[in-house]
């Protein structure tokens, strides 16, 4: 394994503290107002579904599924084969909605609300968990799926830094599946959480994932650590499976914590008021997207920008880019992504120095 290959795999394994949550870390109070309001409506009335509180009509949801995701007859997807079609929906949203922290550097975060998120999802711009996952949940409910929100934390924090979706009653009454398009790691399929202690291994682009149940009822998403990285992890950062293999903890889903959106919003409101703690490695920049069956990832090491291409056979290549070359890469491969967002994100050396460092 050459040094560049090692660096990229290491990046995907160590950057989760930043990239799963970064889209919201500098957001002002207005960025959370709609989430707090939406949660309050649900709690007080207990009548409205999530889809009814999100600014997305059923007609818009059907249009997104048919015209953006390319799935015909959206009104029949839940009725015909709900689990199979949920898999199609989750995979296509993941592939067509880039995970990116671009708005953090662009300044658009100061306008972030549900309408802003919907706009970027319809136009294929993607975003972080705050953008992708609530929109996905609203679409699923309009299609007929029953959902609820779930928050998650990382090892370095007890706060709810991440927000995701659970889909209920697919395989049998009471079954639960995790749908997770809004993270940096490529995970295309819904994850059935009916395993006893540990799940099967889910491998995408050579990156291996596994899920575990803890005694407290919560679920842990783990990733296969690099051998050199494993020696640096503390006991609290790893889980050992039944075969004796050690896995690095990526996210801890707080299934026992009710009102997930409220806790998620409450934490980030503290952060934007300057009263909340953000775990290490949160000042990061990322753009993950899929093109011609490849995962294209843009990241930075100190003052240098890199683009990494990871293929389905787990082979990869990396090359350094200048700012001008990065802009041309977006113009060629992602012409629909606003060039102003890329330009502002890399407009001066100070911001470049703030891009995620590989340590």
Image: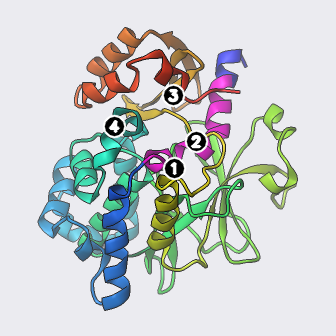
- Distance between the Cα atoms at labels 4 and 3? 32 Å
Q: Which x, y percent locates residue 245?
A: 83, 50
Q: Is residue 23 magenta?
A: yes
Identify the residue shown where x is 44% and y is 53%: 129
x and y percent of residue 23 in the render? Answer: 44, 46
Q: Residues within 10 Å of mark 2 (few under 14, many from 20)?
A: many
Q: Nearer the viewer, residue 203 or 287?
A: 287
Task: Give me the C-alpha separation between circle 1 and circle 4.
Answer: 16 Å
Task: Return the disc, 1 or 2, that comes first in the chain's sequence.
Answer: 1
Total numbered labels: 4
Q: Are marks 1 and 4 in contact (CB under 8 Å)?
A: no
Numbered badge on residue 107: 4
Mark 4 crowdedness (10 Å alpha carbons): few <14, some 14-19, many ≥20: some
Instruction: For residue 73, say whether it is visible.
Output: no
Label 2 residue SS? loop
In the image: residue 166, left or right of residue 134: right
Residue 313: quadrant of the picture: top right
The image's mark for residue 311 is 3
What is the basis of the colouring in this image?
rainbow
Task: Give the residue number, with chain letter if any, for mark 1.
Answer: 21
């Amino acid at each position: 394994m050459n040094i560049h290959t090692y660096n990229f795999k290491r990046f995907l394994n160590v950057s989760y503290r930043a990239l799963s949550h970064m889209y919201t870390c500098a957001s002002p109070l207005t960025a959370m107002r709609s989430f707090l309001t939406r949660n309050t409506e649900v709690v007080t009335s207990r009548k409205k579904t999530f889809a009814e509180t999100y600014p997305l009509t059923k007609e818009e949801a059907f249009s997104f599924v048919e015209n953006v995701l390319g799935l015909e007859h959206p009104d029949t997807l839940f009725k015909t084969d709900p689990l199979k079609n949920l898999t199609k929906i989750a995979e296509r949203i993941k592939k067509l909605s880039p995970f990116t922290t671009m708005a953090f550097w662009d300044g658009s975060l100061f306008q972030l609300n549900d309408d802003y998120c919907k706009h970027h999802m319809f136009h294929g711009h993607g975003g972080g968990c705050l953008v992708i996952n609530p929109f996905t949940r609203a679409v699923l409910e309009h299609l007929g799926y029953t959902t609820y929100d779930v928050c998650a934390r990382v090892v370095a924090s007890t706060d709810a830094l991440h927000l995701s979706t659970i889909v209920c009653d697919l395989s049998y009454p009471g079954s639960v599946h995790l749908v997770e398009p809004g993270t940096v790691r490529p995970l295309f399929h819904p994850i059935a959480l009916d395993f006893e202690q540990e799940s099967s291994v889910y491998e995408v682009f050579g990156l291996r994932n596994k899920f575990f149940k803890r005694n407290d009822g919560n679920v842990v998403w783990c990733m296969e650590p690099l051998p050199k990285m494993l020696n640096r992890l503390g006991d609290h950062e790893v889980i050992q499976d039944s075969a004796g293999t050690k896995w690095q903890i990526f996210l801890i889903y707080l299934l026992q914590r009710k009102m997930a959106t409220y806790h998620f919003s409450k934490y980030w409101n503290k952060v934007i008021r300057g009263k909340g703690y953000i775990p290490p490695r949160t000042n990061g920049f990322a753009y993950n997207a899929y093109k011609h069956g490849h995962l294209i990832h843009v990241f930075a090491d100190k003052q240098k920008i890199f683009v990494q291409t990871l293929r389905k056979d787990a082979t990869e290549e990396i090359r350094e880019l200048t700012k001008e070359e990065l802009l041309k890469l977006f113009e060629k491969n992602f012409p629909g992504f606003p060039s102003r967002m890329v330009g502002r994100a890399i407009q001066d050396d100070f911001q470049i120095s703030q891009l995620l460092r590989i340590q």
